[in-house]
Amino acid sequence: VECEDVKSGKRRLFAAKLFVDSTGTNSPVSRQINAGKSITHVCPTVGTVAKGFTRGSDDKEIDFSVGEILVSTEDASDNRQLIWEGFAGNQKKDEYTTYLFFYDSVESKADKSLLRLFEDYFEKLPSYKKKNGAWRVVKPVFGYIPSVHHHGWDSVKKTAANRILLVGDAAGLSSPLTFCGFGSHVRNLRKLTAKTENALQANLLGENFLSKINAYEPRVAQMSSLAEFMRPTEKGKPSTVNETMNAVMAALSSLDVTVRREMFQDRISFASFKKVLMKTAKIHPAVFKKMFSQLGTKGTFWWIANIAEAALHERNAKE
């Protein structure tokens, strides 16, 4: 690899057996080996670390012992279903982090501007949490969380080429429900490190072998389509996303705590996933009709295929 110092103009040549790219979502290498595309979906996210929220046990008050995820205060509008999350920081410093975000595909017509989303954040924050007179922003937080949805076994994102390996957000193999690409990589760090070491020692650095060194997990792929239910369709009712979320959360609350933990940590087993689906369908019988409406025939087929792949992968792992 030839690198040029921007200030001095001097060039240096670096050589290695393997080039590892961890430059993030906008990796030019990732786009190059994926025909110009590196992600299919994105989650625009803004928020603040702030002081001065009202403390208490009310829904609009903050409790430093409780974290909140997937909170909705209104139905969808402008092709976006806005969702809140809140996490306690340093209690002594009275610092609490709140986020506002929405799930979307990169090709949708929805406004994905972070500036627009920040305007919504400050306008709508009182509908989520109460502020007292001392409220002030410590620092803003913002960014885009990328993801890749797989609609078919041949559509899995390429994470390697000859002597090139993508890691973290550059690889982008994650579920947008909880983990970004970096989190997915860290969670699989021991496995990925061991495989990379084996590849280097055996000099197996071709695309076919390196492509097996990634954080892709069939059980995460079965979860990724759930994020499709978190964004509105043009013909759907504004309340559809909230109705579906309420049904899923009601199903989760009635199941064992291990199921909830597995789901929100992106490691749900096929057995637990089946329980969630069956319980949700019982609470909200129209959910499967909405599934076809939301995903379409092709999307529904590949979601079922991903579920079948996860079940087969889990069974083979036990043998």
Image: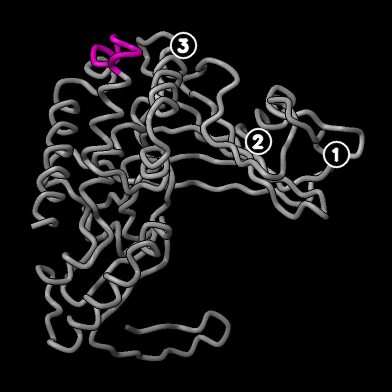
Identify the residue position indicated by label 3 in the image. 239
Q: Residue furthest front?
A: 256
Q: Is residue 7 above or below residue 214?
A: below
Residue found at x 13% / y 57%: 317
Q: Is residue 195 above or below residue 245?
A: below
CA neighbours of label 2 inside 10 A, class few (<14), some (14 to 19), many (20+): many
- Figure quadrant of residue 207: bottom left
Identify the residue position indicated by label 1 in the image. 135
Q: Are marks 2 and 3 in contact (CB under 8 Å)?
A: no
Query: Dot 3 lies on which element?
Result: loop
Q: Position of residue 45 (x, y in %)?
A: 55, 41
Query: Dot 1 lies on which element?
Result: strand
Identify the residue position indicated by label 2 in the image. 118
**Prevalent SS, magenta region:** helix
Question: What range is drawn magenta here?
Answer: 281-290
- Point out the tag, 1 or 2, that comes first from the N-terminus: 2
